[in-house]
Image (spheres, rainbow, N blue to C red):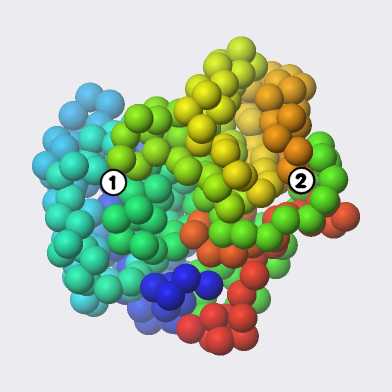
């Protein structure tokens, strides 16, 4: 585990929900908040979450302030992003990274557009983060209640004493076993970060990839961009998550990634599908194609934190 690994949550801890990206559906937010309360957590909300501006949850300054204030609040043990959408990249130059680093390690949870924050937190704070379901997103805030496997695995990922299990895949594209820190996330966001200070550099890492509503030719284009940018140079393996509404995308993924000669597992329930499992980024994991899974490598001490 990373030397700045955040402490795991315990019942009674305070967590904050903020909206760094798209506007939040209020009903979904309250259902998702209830799910977290039922886990024994005290939940607070960013004070500027509802200053909606078209396709953003609010002005950049408001969204950045909510995120930074929550992170720097010593009473807050974890910050959960309400949903994805678009807008996280616009905050990266507005955050006071020195102040956030001084606040010490805590847990950041989010997926999709939040990929930008995951890479920035790794680069600027040296922190592992959790790529996982969000309280105002699908699976946690659906009317019929949270998806059971999603909620159970999120609990295992976040809470002290819980043993996180391997995330199972459905198909092996390239056999082998690889160990290394996990990075990556949403393919569209990884491509959009090329040429920025937060761009993906996968050398020595396992890379998680997923996306939603992207046609195979667009997936091809983004993979080609990352390959030509050198983002995958030295990669040790790939874990491919969900590709909801992306058509028959596995042949494209295989064509672009197999020449790299590393283990590849596909069909992991990570990303935009249901269930939506959680994955620690920035900590060591193992891709094992015999079990077709991505598993975290935690010590007993890490499990107890």
Where disc 1 sits, the SS reads loop
Left or right of 132? Residue 17 is left
Is residue 178 visible to us here? yes
Q: Residue extending furthest right? A: 290
Q: Which residue is mark 2?
A: 263
Instruction: Identify the residue at horizontal 56%, vertical 67% (top origin).
Output: 157
Where is residue 286 drawn, in percent x and y?
A: 70, 60
Where disc 2 sits, the SS reads loop
Residue 156 vertical placement versus 180 (above, below): below
Is residue 29 visible to us here? no
Question: Viewer-proximal residue, 262 or 79?
Answer: 262
Residue 77 vertical placement versus 150 (above, below): below
Distance, label 1 to label 2, CA atoms, is: 36 Å
Instruction: Identify the residue at horizontal 57%, vertical 81% (top origin).
Output: 303
Where is residue 249 drawn, in percent x and y?
A: 70, 22
Question: Viewer-proximal residue, 10 or 96?
Answer: 96
Q: Earlier in the sequence, mark 1 or mark 2?
A: 1
- In front: label 1 or label 2: 2
Left or right of 16? Residue 153 is right
Left or right of 84? Residue 204 is right
Left or right of 247? Residue 129 is left
Where is residue 102 drawn, in percent x and y?
A: 20, 71
Q: Which residue is mark 1?
A: 19
Residue 212 vertical placement versus 147 (above, below): above
Where is residue 281 drawn, in percent x and y?
A: 51, 57
Instruction: Identify the residue at horizontal 62%, vertical 23% (top origin).
Output: 245
Q: Quadrant of residue 216?
A: top right
Instruction: Identify the residue at horizontal 38%, vertical 56% (top origin).
Output: 122
Question: Viewer-proximal residue, 239 or 8?
Answer: 239
């Amino acid at each position: 585990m990373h030397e700045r690994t955040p402490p795991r949550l315990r019942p009674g801890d305070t967590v904050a929900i903020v909206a760094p990206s798209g506007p939040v559906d209020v009903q979904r937010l309250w259902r998702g908040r209830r799910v977290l309360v039922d886990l024994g957590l005290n939940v607070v909300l960013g004070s500027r979450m509802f200053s909606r501006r078209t396709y953003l949850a609010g002005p950049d300054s408001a969204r950045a302030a909510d995120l930074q204030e929550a992170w720097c609040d010593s009473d807050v043990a974890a910050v959960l992003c309400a949903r994805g959408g678009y807008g996280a990249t616009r905050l990266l130059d507005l955050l006071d990274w020195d102040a956030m680093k001084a606040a010490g390690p805590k847990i950041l949870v989010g997926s999709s557009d939040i990929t930008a924050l995951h890479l920035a937190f790794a680069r600027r704070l040296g922190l592992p983060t959790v790529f996982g379901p969000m309280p105002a997103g699908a699976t946690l805030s659906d009317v019929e209640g949270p998806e059971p496997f999603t909620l159970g695995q999120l609990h295992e990922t976040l809470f002290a004493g819980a043993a996180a299990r391997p995330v199972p895949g459905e198909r092996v594209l390239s056999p082998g076993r690889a160990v290394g820190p996990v990075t990556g996330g949403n393919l569209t966001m990884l491509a959009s970060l090329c040429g920025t200070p937060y761009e993906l550099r996968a050398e020595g890492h396992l890379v998680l990839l997923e996306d939603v509503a992207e046609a195979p030719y667009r997936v091809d284009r983004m993979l080609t961009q990352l390959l030509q940018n050198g983002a995958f140079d030295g990669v040790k393996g790939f874990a491919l998550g969900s590709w909801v509404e992306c058509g028959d995308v596995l042949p494209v993924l295989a064509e672009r990634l197999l020449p790299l000669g590393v283990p590849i597992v596909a069909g992991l329930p990570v990303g935009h599908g249901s269930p939506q499992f959680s994955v620690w980024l920035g900590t060591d994991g193992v891709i094992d194609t015999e079990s077709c899974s991505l598993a975290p490598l935690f010590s007993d001490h890490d499990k107890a934190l």
